[in-house]
Amino acid sequence: MTASPTAGSSRAPHPTALAVVVPAHNEAQELPGALDAVRTAARHPALADLPVVTVVVADACTDATPAVAAQRGAAVIELPDRNVGAARAAGVAHALHLLRPHGERTWIVTTDADSRVPPHWLAHQLHHARQGWHCIVGTVRLAHRPVLPVTTVARHNAHYFAGRPSWPLLWCHPHVHGANLGIAAGPYRAAGGFPALTHGEDRALVAALERRGCPILRTDECPVRTSGRPDPRAPHGFGTFLRQLSLGLDLDFDRDLAAPVVVPGDRSGDLRP
């Protein structure tokens, strides 16, 4: 946590709608699993009376990503830019337009096309949004495929859980992942939204919210599974970071993208390493 919902900042209104934004560059293979997971999360009983809109931003795609997204029932917009920050921003703008009757009562959540959200992900977001948080910064875990070298896994564990207390729910982690991020519409707009960056757009937005004194919850309660594939879609993004770790390069963890963790033998989404 960087501020509590009652400390020095007005509460955001309770959400009456949720907008899920998924940027995708040539993700026809991974996208079905990602959207199926989002659809499952949207069917959680806690969301029974709330509309959920999913927007896929097909970013400079040359494959069937737009068609796959449409087949899964997502709203689709296409961009030529190959810029993940611009893609997230465009996706949010389109979702807010679709949900315009809800205005600032829309809760925005973002994930990635190579990620799998847990079934209670949106319920978790809604619960904390109703407590008054302006932003929820979640964690990730690496998917079990592809299998990474043991040395890379060990380096990830050391990086990702550095300083983590023995009781996981007390961990105010330092990471920011576009794969697991939620923001109230009003504070999102006031902070300027996602900047048009090719990487680090998620960190830049959270930093802007912090400068405004917004209540931000950093929590490890509901991690998202994300791919450890060696062919990264975003330049200087997570895949590049993985590749650097596998080469044994000495990285500045506060400067470079925070790395998810592989939990050996964990196939249940357990929070503990």
Image (spheres, rainbow, N blue to C red):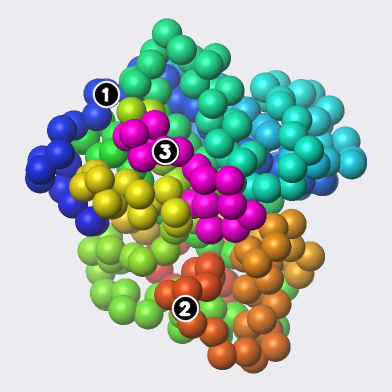
State how far apart marks 2 and 3 are (Cα): 26 Å
**Residue 206 drawn above or below residue 28:** below
Q: Which of the two discs, 1 and 3, labels the residue nearer the N terminus?
A: 1
Observer able to see residue 81:
yes
Label 2 crowd bin: few (<14), some (14–19), many (20+), radius 10 Å? few
Distance from disc 1 to disc 3, alpha carbons, whole Å, reads 21 Å
Q: Mark 1 is on which residue type?
A: His
Question: On the rendered image, what quadrant is the C terminus found in?
Answer: bottom left
Instruction: Give the residue type that dot 2 points to.
Output: Phe
Residue indicated by mark 3? 192
Residue drawn at the location 18% of the way across and 51% of the way down: 3
Q: Where residue 255 appears, x then y in whole percent?
A: 47, 74
Please give the residue where the numbered disc 1 appears in the rendered image: 14
Q: Nearer the viewer, mark 1 or mark 3?
A: 3
Whether residue 17 is situated above or below residue 113 in the rendered picture: above
- Quarter of the picture containing the N terminus is bottom left
**Amino acid type, label 3:** Gly
Is residue 190 one of those drawn in magenta?
yes
Which of discs 1 and 2 lies nearer the camera? The answer is 2
Give x and y (percent) for residue 207: 36, 54
Q: Main secondary structure of the magenta part?
A: loop
Left or right: where 29 falls relative to 93: right
Q: Point out residue 86 in the picture as x, y percentages from the top left corner.
A: 61, 41
* Residue 253 marker: 2
Specify start and end residues of the magenta stretch as a single range: 187-202
**Residue at image x 45%, y 32%?**
108
Q: Is residue 223 left or right of residue 169?
A: right
Label 3 SS: loop
Residue with the most extreme top position: 101
